Image (cartoon, grey):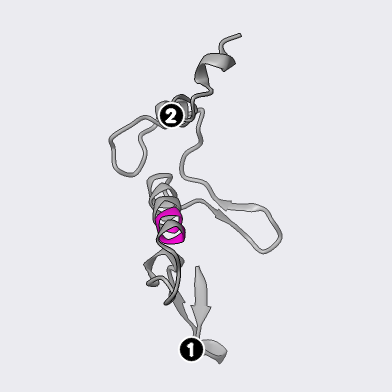
Amino acid sequence: MLLAGAGSSAAAAEVCDIPPRFGTSPAAIAIVHNACNEHRLWQRPFIDAKGRVASLGVTEAESGYLADHGLVAWQRVAGYWRDSGTLASMGG
């Protein structure tokens, strides 16, 4: 989250809602789009300025659903490994 404005009248702007800068490559735009989508799915975890977890809605080991109610958190993580082609090597 970015704070825009001066003094006490600062307004919060969600980084993922800001349009891409002019001249940004299609690949970079796709990476940002996917990262923002994952951030929303994982219920917008937040790390404060000191590097501490300030908000964590769900973790990868949980059986709770992600924000879209489509997958359980651990199933999403298993999908990352499967889609990367490395899941089979994790089995030993």
Label number found at residue 83: 2
The correct choice, above or below, for 78 with respect to 23 in the image is: above
Marks 1 and 2 sit apart, C-alpha to C-alpha, by 45 Å
Q: Which residues are magenta?
A: 28-32
Q: Nearer the viewer, residue 57 or 88?
A: 88
Q: How many marks?
A: 2
The correct choice, above or below, for 48 with respect to 87 in the image is: below
Give me the residue at 33% from left, 31% from top: 71
- Work out whether mark 1 precedes mark 2 in sequence or the reverse, and give the earlier one: 1
Three-letter code for the amino acid on which mark 2 is drawn: Asp
Spot occupied by residue 88 in the image (x, y as percentages of width and height): 51, 15
Spot occupied by residue 45 in the image (x, y as percentages of width and height): 50, 51
Spot occupied by residue 34 in the image (x, y as percentages of width and height): 40, 50
Q: Nearer the viewer, residue 83 or 62?
A: 83
Q: Which quadrant is the C terminus positioned in?
A: top right
Give me the residue at 41% from left, 70% from top: 20
Q: Quadrant of residue 15?
A: bottom left
The residue that disc 1 covers is 9
Q: Quadrant of residue 66?
A: top left
